């Protein structure tokens, strides 16, 4: 079975795709890219998506769910804006979504149901559809492989860096690509997919199979990321499969297993980028829980530790306060014996059998000063394990979010 390798490229590395981005004035900073369009030129392109589990869902989420159902997965374009979430905007928000989709479809020669929408930014502020529709003619003209890299920048809000990855492999002697971009730094605890992420592939995959593969890939990637424990109103992971490579991927086949490995690798790469780029973060933190009775218990404990403000601030200050870690595990709701727990920081034992391990304070602080930290808990209760990616919590997180709207 062929391996997947990371290659240079963009969303247009997958055959059949073009993309472009523009500055429309939705963002406060003049000249900032805030609108992107991803288009497949292949008529038989199929799409699938996963959306936020938040009961309060943004207009583009509601609209795109409906489009996918009505089109039976026939999708050719994704239109995304940043700077305004178009969430909690009522009928005006839905009308703005419809206007934008209709305008894009008309210019691309598509049906409105073939267009997916996504938005990110401030909640509760009406989206001015004219800012988008007036720029669409020029944006469509700019669609190309050369302009595709700009999409990763256009979807950023508080992100410090654009996040993208491209993988390549072969099946039956034919090259296949999976490409992806993502954005997210705050309001990160999706439990479904990711904040915003868009994937392109030139494999030939039906919408049901594509959705199944997406669900499997995000289980141990985007669903294992948390920055602050908040699930957004706008979380969207959308994928388009052009089929141009000629490689068919069907459910339950060897090709599907091969393809899932690449898709999972891509999603993990983007997920780690999101955790590393958490708002105000200085350190990537990997929580590994081992020796649990059940996988669900391991995940509960890992997630509780990853979301604990006390744990995250201790890491920010390089304070080896292992008691906070054990405390978070204890209130997670998982069953375990605290008297059997071992805790290590980057391999350094700080807790043994639920008690202080007699570690060297200076050595522990040195480990916590690193920009990548692994907290490993061994419960010694069973064989199940789980891993969560998170980051430290610094004063910069407060600064960013205290003034995000104003």
Image (tube, grey):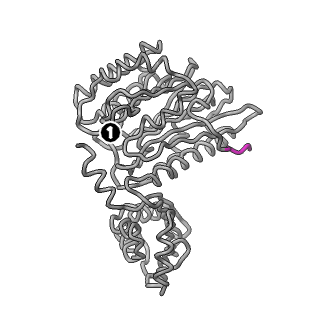
Asked where in the image residue 25 lies, by quadrant, the reply is top left
Circle 1: element type: strand
Horizontal and vertical percent position of residue 224 = 47, 54
Where on the picture, by quarter, is residue 179?
Answer: top right
Give how far across and how far down residue 6 sits, in percent: 65, 44
How many marks overall? 1
Q: Is residue 306 left or right of residue 233?
A: right
- Picture residue at 47% right of the left edge, 18% below the top: 140
- Residue neighbourhood size for the residue with mark 1, other residues' Cα within 10 Å, grouped as few (<14), some (14–19), many (≥20): many
Where residue 163 sits: x, y (%)?
50, 43
Q: Is residue 200 above or below residue 271?
A: above
Q: State which region is magenta.
A: 1-5
Residue drawn where x is 35% and y is 55% of the image: 229
Q: Which quadrant of the figure contains the N terminus?
A: top right
Residue drawn at point x = 63 percent, y = 45 percent: 261
The image position of residue 170, as x and y in percent, is: 72, 36
Is residue 175 shown left or right of residue 235? Answer: right
Name the residue that disc number 1 marks.
Answer: 121
Residue 3 is one of the magenta-drawn residues: yes
Q: Residue furthest bottom?
A: 358
Q: Main secondary structure of the magenta part?
A: loop
176 or 400, nearer to the observer: 400
The image quadrant that residue 100 belongs to is: top left
Report the front residue among 28 and 344. Answer: 28
**In the displayed structure image, the side of residue 77 where residue 257 appears, left or right:** right
Is 257 part of what is drawn in magenta? no
**From this viewpoint, which residue is outermost toward the front?**
30
Quadrant of image for the C terminus: top left
């Amino acid at each position: 079975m062929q391996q997947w390798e990371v290659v240079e490229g963009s969303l247009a590395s997958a055959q059949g795709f073009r993309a472009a981005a523009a500055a429309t004035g939705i963002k406060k900073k003049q000249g900032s890219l805030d609108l992107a369009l991803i288009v497949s030129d292949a008529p038989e392109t199929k799409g699938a998506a996963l959306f936020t589990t938040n009961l309060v869902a943004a207009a583009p989420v509601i609209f795109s769910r409906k489009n996918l159902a009505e089109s039976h997965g026939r999708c050719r374009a994704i239109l995304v804006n940043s700077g305004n979430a178009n969430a909690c905007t009522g009928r005006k928000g839905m009308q703005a979504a419809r206007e934008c989709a209709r305008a894009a479809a008309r210019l691309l020669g598509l049906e409105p149901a073939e267009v997916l929408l996504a938005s990110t930014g401030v909640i509760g502020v009406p989206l001015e559809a004219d800012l988008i529709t007036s720029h669409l003619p020029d944006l469509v003209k700019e669609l190309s492989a050369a302009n595709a890299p700009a999409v990763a920048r256009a979807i950023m809000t508080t992100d410090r860096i654009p996040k993208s990855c491209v993988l390549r492999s072969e099946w039956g002697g034919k090259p296949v690509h999976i490409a992806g971009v993502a954005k997210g730094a705050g309001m990160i605890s999706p439990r479904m997919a990711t904040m915003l992420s868009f994937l392109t592939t030139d494999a030939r995959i039906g919408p049901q199979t594509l959705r199944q593969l997406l669900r499997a890939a995000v289980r141990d990637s985007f669903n294992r990321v948390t920055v602050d424990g908040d699930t957004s109103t706008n979380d969207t992971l959308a994928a388009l499969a052009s089929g141009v490579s000629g490689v068919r991927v069907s459910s339950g086949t060897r090709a599907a297993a091969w393809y899932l490995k690449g898709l999972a690798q891509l999603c993990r790469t983007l997920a780690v980028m999101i955790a590393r780029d958490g708002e105000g973060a200085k350190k990537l933190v990997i929580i590994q829980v081992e020796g649990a009775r059940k996988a669900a218990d391991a995940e509960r404990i890992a997630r509780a530790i990853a979301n604990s403000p006390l744990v995250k601030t201790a890491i920010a200050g390089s304070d080896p306060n292992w008691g906070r870690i054990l405390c978070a595990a204890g209130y997670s709701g998982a069953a375990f014996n605290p008297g059997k727990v071992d805790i290590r920081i980057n391999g350094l034992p700080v807790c043994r059998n639920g008690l202080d391990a007699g570690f060297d304070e200076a050595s522990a602080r040195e480990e916590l000063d690193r920009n990548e930290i692994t907290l490993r808990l061994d419960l010694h209760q069973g064989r199940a394990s789980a891993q969560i990616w998170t980051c430290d919590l610094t004063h910069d997180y407060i600064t960013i979010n205290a003034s995000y709207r104003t």
